[in-house]
Structures are given as C-alpha cells and as structure tokens.
C-alpha cells in the first residue's frame, strides 16, 4: 500500500502540475480538496482521467468521486480494490 | 440604434432562418446518439449536407460560414464591397478540425483570423475582418462589437456570422469535462445530465439606423439591438459563480431603463449542464424576471458554441414576429432552484422585446436586449473619449514567463497549471500593473495564433493516450488567459479577445476606442498577446484611462 500511495503522489503531482510540491509534502490522510493542496473541480476531472489512464478505472459520476478523492490514502484503497491494470 | 436587416440560420435542420423556425415549431431536431467510443448525442450535418455546402478550396467550416452569409445577403439589398462594411466572425475553434499535431501535415488549416480573411475575400468584403473568440458568449460579444463599431460611426453596416463545427477535438474535450449527455439534452430539467454539441452557422446583417436600405424601407417596425453588456465572474475558469453575480450584472446593464413588462421572453443559454442552468435560474430570479417566459433552444440544436448567441437571438426574433414564445424542448420537471417560468409549451405574446443571456468558460457572461420597433435615424451615440495611456509594458526578445514568475512573482502556484499563452498574459499583466495604482475594469486583448500551442498539445495527448486532459482542453479556449487575469486581479467587467490575421494597429485602435466610448469601464487593459509556438512570444500591454473632462 505504501508503494501505491507514493506512486499516486508522484502521478498526482505530475498530472496536476503541482510544480513546487514533492511527494513528501503530501500527507497520506490530508484532505486533497478545499484545504490541503487547494485542488479544484478541474483537478478532480484530471484525477478521474489519471485513474482511467493508469489503472483502468472509469468513474462515471463526479459526485461519487468526492469520497474517493478525500485523501491520497482513500484513492489508494479504491485503486487497490478496483484497478483493472 | 442598430437595426437587423437580414438573418440566416444554417443548421442540420434547415438552410435558412425560416426553415429552421418551421422545423423547430414542428418538433424536428438533428440530435442523435453517436456511439463510436463513449456515446454522446449531437446535432451534426450529414455527409450529404456537408457535400452540398462544400466549396472547393475551402474547409467545411469556411464553406458553412460562406453559405450562411450569402443566404443572409440574398435578402438584403446592400453592398458589402464598400469600405464602411465590417465582417465579424464569432467562433470558438474555427478550423481546428483541420489542425494536425505536426505542422508539416497542416493541409487547409488556418488560424481563425486568417480563416476570416479568406472568407471575407471570397465574399467580397474590402475591410479586414475581426474574429471574436470568447468561448460560448462569442455570438453576443460579436454583436456587441458590431453595435459599437456602428454607433461610433466607424462603419455603417456589419455582417456578423457565428459558426462552429464539432470534431473529435471538441467532443473529447467536453467528454473529459463529463459534460456531454448521451441523450438529447434537457435544459432546466431535474434529470438533465449534460449538453449536446451542435453544428451550425448563423448570420445577422446589421446597420446603423440612419443607413437606408430598401429591404427594410417598407416595414413599419424592425428588429433592433437596443443595448447589451458583458462581464466576468472573476471566480473560476469553468464553474459559474454560484450566486450568478456576473450574469446578474450583465442583465441589469442590458435592461437599463427598460420596463420588464415589455419583455416577452428571456432566452437562456440553457446548456442542460447542472451548473449552468442552476446559475441562470438564480440570475433570472435575482433580476426580477421570474414571471417572464424563459425559453431555451439547445434541446433542438445542441450547443452550437460560436453560433449560439446569434442563432438563438435570430430564432427568438422570428418567433416573436409570429407573436410566439417557443417551448423548451426536453424540459419536463423543474430542476433548478431559482424561480423561473419555463416555457414548456408554445405561448402567445403581445410583447415586442426579449432578453438574451449567455455565459461561458473563462468566467464570461453577456446579455443583450432586442426590441421590434419603428426605427428612426438616431444620432450616433459614441463620443470618442480622450484617452490617456497610464502605463505600458512590452516583452523583450528573451522574455521567459517562467523565469520572471520564479524571480519576481512566485506567489501563485496556479501559474504552473497555465499554458504558455496564459502564463505570458499573467506575467505581462503583473509587470504592467506594478507600475500603477489603477485597476482595470475590463480587458480587451488581440492575437493571431489563438491557442494553437494548447490545441496541438490536446491533439497530441489524444493521439498518444486516447483520453483528453481536461486542464489542457480548457486552455484550448484562448479567452481563458483573460479568465486567469480576471481572477488574479478581480476584474469583473468585459473580457474580450479578438483574433486578427495580422497585427493591425488601426483596427485594434478602432475596437479599443469603440469599447471605451460605449462601456462604463473607465480604465481598460489592452494589448497583443501571441504565442505562435514554443520559441516565440509577442506580448505588449497597456493600461488606458478615459480622461476626466471636469478635472484639469
């Protein structure tokens, strides 16, 4: 799981152009949206593409993604359970 | 006062305004589901229709615009080859379907300003054309520009045409925003799940009211564009302001001095996305228009992007000629919380004016009031104001937005998400506004290459990964750079981008002067921001202020 969390952090940083942030800056359980990294709705859409591209996960409903995108750890759990690649 | 001499709508359900109006009344629509890959519904021309439109040596987009303008001109007894007629093209992506990742494979692709010039020459216009590129509000922006150019006396007539074609480029982009509906869209309905793209061109021929034309000479009343306004939310690039403050402001400006009892319908943008329709309902309620019929046509035509602000106003005029307000196709059950009176079934009306409202990516909103009335030659309105240049900034030959950002700005991490065009505009604006205490109320920018770097990047990602990146697609709308500027500096007035085939200082000066003379903005930021490729940047901005006659 730790390895997946780290990989996700690097993928998120790259996909969202979080230029001045390193994987170490992102806490596993810190909220990604609102506070935390201050991500917005376009970033959420970009994360949906990221999961599709890298893990073959298709999220249809942006509302459903809210709980999945709560923190890097929640994403990692969802990926671990639902990945098709 | 500006009068509407002639119109055309070219869509998959008709080649003329009349055909489209009759088709709408009969319940026709070309919306259907396309299922190669992720399914989406759209209103697209058939292969046979495209072939019918096509003109040799011109792209489908260009041919469609030419057909629309020619048909509109056939009802108008005017000469467009004089130097007092302006051609304005409203489009979000023009010829982008012809763009290839590699420059060497370009074929018939031209940047939007060059496309407009090619069309203008074919049609016989003598003056250089202008392209208005403000995402979804372009159609109204183009009419606003035309109105100003006519009212200030710079031109007598304007041919305003709006058009966009759907292609993998736009479809994949809207899909990445999860905003396309696989079924015909349902504006304002509780079950709406997204928009449909639609292909169309729509043309309005406008003249200043003192211009005589035999077409309207024997009509007691004519359609006129009364007034309009554009604003920016300065809130978010793709999500409308939840309280719709920007749209409210645009509506209030367009309705100034007009009793709402005379308004037959508010013709909404009604894209059938969750956010847009909800936001519009709030704006309509807050502006006291809850009891006026709300109409919207995207359940028939889809979202025709650069054409929509023209197409939907033209159709509303035609319906009101028959004293009718057209029903909202796809609407069944109220799905917005603002109090609005949705026109579910065709309604009769004896009112002779209507309000068009529209909003788009980049935070922009616009609203326009139209009225059918006896048209008296009026005085030219625009008083050319005395203008002071408060400050200027120009990029040197080795200008690097990234370097400047790191060295002397460094407090705005969003910078790294922007494309090269927005980064350039962002840094240029910072360096300009540092020289002064003044804050611009509006932005008027010009360029030539549109957003071609992001356009190519979007295509390259599609080629390589098959999935669009929503953040890259967003920047394929070049007006996004002004959305970034508006958010950073809280600029809530008009934000307009015009694309030219070359840096034509005289034409740019006309646009800026017409804007300053006919808007409330006292201080505007204007200039040229162009990024044709990764090696070149042209950036030159200045801050202009109207001179106050009463002090010194």
Image: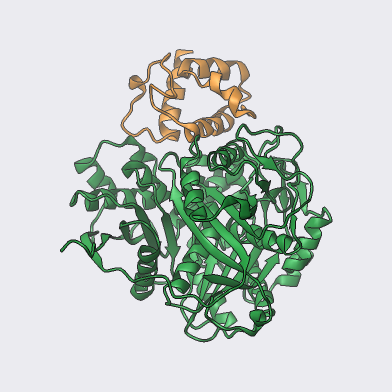
Front position in the image: B40 or B533: B40
Q: Residue furthest right?
A: B26
Look at the image and give the colour of chain A. Answer: orange
Q: Residue at x 46, y 23 (%)?
A: A8
Chain B as rendered: colour: green
Is residue B213 something that shows in the picture?
yes
Q: Is residue A52 above or below residue B379?
A: above
The answer to whether residue B156 is left or right of residue B276 is left
Could you say which is closer to the camera, residue B348 or residue B480? Answer: B348
Q: How many marks?
A: 0
Name the quadrant containing residue B352. Answer: bottom right
Task: State the image coordinates of residue A78 (x, y, percent, origin top left).
Answer: 57, 17
> For this view, does B90 lie left or right of residue B522?
right
The answer to whether residue B392 is above or below residue B119 is above
Q: Residue B164: x percent and y percent?
A: 61, 60
Which residue is rendered at x = 23% and y = 41% of the image? B409
Residue at the image position 49 percent from the left and 63 percent from the top = B144
Asked if residue A17 is positioned above or below residue B495 in the image, the reply reads: above
Q: Position of residue B28 (x, y in %)?
A: 82, 55
Observer-nearest of A43 and B204 = B204
């Amino acid at each position: 799981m730790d390895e997946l969390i780290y990989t996700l952090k690097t993928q998120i940083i790259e996909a969202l152009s979080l230029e001045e942030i390193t994987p170490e800056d992102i806490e596993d359980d810190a909220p990604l949206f609102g506070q935390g990294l201050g991500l917005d709705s376009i970033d959420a859409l970009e994360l949906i593409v990221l999961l599709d591209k890298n893990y073959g996960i298709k999220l249809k409903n942006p509302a459903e993604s809210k709980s999945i995108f709560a923190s890097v750890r929640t994403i990692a759990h969802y990926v671990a359970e639902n990945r098709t690649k | 006062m500006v009068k509407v001499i002639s119109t055309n709508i070219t869509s998959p359900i008709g080649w003329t305004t009349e055909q489209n109006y009759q088709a709408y009344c009969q319940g026709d629509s070309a919306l259907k589901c396309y299922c190669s890959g992720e399914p989406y519904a759209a209103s697209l021309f058939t292969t046979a229709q495209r072939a019918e439109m096509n003109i040799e040596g011109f792209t489908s987009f260009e041919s469609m615009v030419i057909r629309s303008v020619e048909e509109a001109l056939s009802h108008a007894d005017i000469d467009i080859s004089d130097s007092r007629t302006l051609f304005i093209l409203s489009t979000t992506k023009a010829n982008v379907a012809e763009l290839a990742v590699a420059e060497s494979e370009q074929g018939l692709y031209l940047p939007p300003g060059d496309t407009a010039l090619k069309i203008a020459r074919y049609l016989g216009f003598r003056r250089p054309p202008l392209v208005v590129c403000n995402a979804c509000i372009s159609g109204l922006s183009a009419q606003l520009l035309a109105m100003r150019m006519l009212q200030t006396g710079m031109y007598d007539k304007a041919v305003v045409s709006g058009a966009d074609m759907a292609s993998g480029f736009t479809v994949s982009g809207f899909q990445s925003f999860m905003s396309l509906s696989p079924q015909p869209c349902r504006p304002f309905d509780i079950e709406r799940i997204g928009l449909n793209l639609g292909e169309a061109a729509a043309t309005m021929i406008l003249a200043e009211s003192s211009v005589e034309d035999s077409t309207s000479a024997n009509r007691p009343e004519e359609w006129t564009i009364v007034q309009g306004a554009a604003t920016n939310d300065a809130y978010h690039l793709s999500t409308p302001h939840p309280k719709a403050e920007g749209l409210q402001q645009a509506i209030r400006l367009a309705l100034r001095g007009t009793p709402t009892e005379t308004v037959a319908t508010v013709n909404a943008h009604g894209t059938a996305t969750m956010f847009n329709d909800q936001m519009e309902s709030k704006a309509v309620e807050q502006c006291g228009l809850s009891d006026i019929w709300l109409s919207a046509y995207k359940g028939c035509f889809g979202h025709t992007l650069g054409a929509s602000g023209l197409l939907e106003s033209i159709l509303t005029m035609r319906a009101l000629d028959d004293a009718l307000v057209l029903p909202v196709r796809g609407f069944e059950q109220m799905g917005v919380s603002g109090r609005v009176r949705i026109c579910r079934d065709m309604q009769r009306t004896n009112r002779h004016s209507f309000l068009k409202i529209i909003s788009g990516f980049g935070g922009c909103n616009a609203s326009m009031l139209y009225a059918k009335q006896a048209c008296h030659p009026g005085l030219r309105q625009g008083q050319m104001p005395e203008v002071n240049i408060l400050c200027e900034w120009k990029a040197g030959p080795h200008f690097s937005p990234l370097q400047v950002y790191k060295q002397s700005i460094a407090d705005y991490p969003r910078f790294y998400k922007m494309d090269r065009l927005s980064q350039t505009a962002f840094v240029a604006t910072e360096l300009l506004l540092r020289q002064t205490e003044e804050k611009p109320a509006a932005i008027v920018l010009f360029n030539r290459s549109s957003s071609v770097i992001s356009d190519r990047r979007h295509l390259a990602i599609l080629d390589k990964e098959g999935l669009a990146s929503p953040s890259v697609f967003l920047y394929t709308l070049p007006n996004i750079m002004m959305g970034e500027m508006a958010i950073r500096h809280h600029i809530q007035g008009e934000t307009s981008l015009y694309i030219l085939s070359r840096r034509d200082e005289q034409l740019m000066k006309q646009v800026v002067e017409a804007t300053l003379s006919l808007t409330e903005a006292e201080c505007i930021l204007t200039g040229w921001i162009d990024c044709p490729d990764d090696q070149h940047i042209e950036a030159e901005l200045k801050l202009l202020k109207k001179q106050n006659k009463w002090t010194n």
